[in-house]
Amino acid sequence: MDETKVQDTMNIILNAGDARTHIMHALDSLGDFDYQKAKDEMKLANEKLVVAHKLQTDRLQNEAEGEGVEYSVLFTHAQDTLMTIYSEYNITKHLITVFEKRDAKEGK
């Protein structure tokens, strides 16, 4: 794998990791019933996930266009990390909605 691909792969991992940090902050804010702060953190998480996803998509598109690709444990790890954090993102986003609905129903 050439240096550019290694850098891009590491940037997938780094951006996904940054997104996870924002997701954890969102969950902390959710626990404090600070829904606006939780949503703000989720917005930041989403921005990081978009960057990571674009890097992954570019790499996959190159392969689809016929560029030779060698197997990479690092890229496999990056994809696994990204997909795991996407799941955490989606669950957290749903939890925020559930908590807000619960509080609205209880008149809080």
Image (cartoon, rainbow, N blue to C red):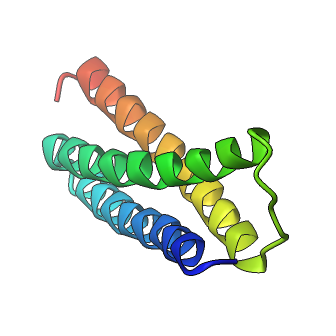
Place of residue 23 in the rendered image (x, y in percent of width and height, measured from the top left): 37, 58
Q: Residue at x 31, y 47 (%)?
A: 47
Q: Nearer the viewer, residue 97 or 13?
A: 13
For the point 51% across and 41% down, the residue is 90
List x then y, in percent, for residue 81: 62, 66
Q: Residue at x 63, y 58 (%)?
A: 84
Q: Residue 44, position in %: x, y? A: 25, 51
Residue 4 or residue 92, whichever sits in front: 4
Look at the picture and state if 24 lies above or below 52: below
Residue 27, position in %: x, y? 35, 57
Would residue 81 appear left or right of 22 to someone viewing this image? right
Instruction: Give the quadrant of residue 25.
Output: bottom left
Query: Which quadrant of the figure contains the C terminus?
Result: top left
Above or below residue 106? Residue 29 is below
Residue sitting at x 27%, y 29%: 103
* Above or below, 95 relative to 74: above
Would residue 12 appear left or right of 66 to someone viewing this image? left
Left or right for 94, reference 69: left
Report the label total: 0
Position of the N terminus, as image quadrant, is bottom right
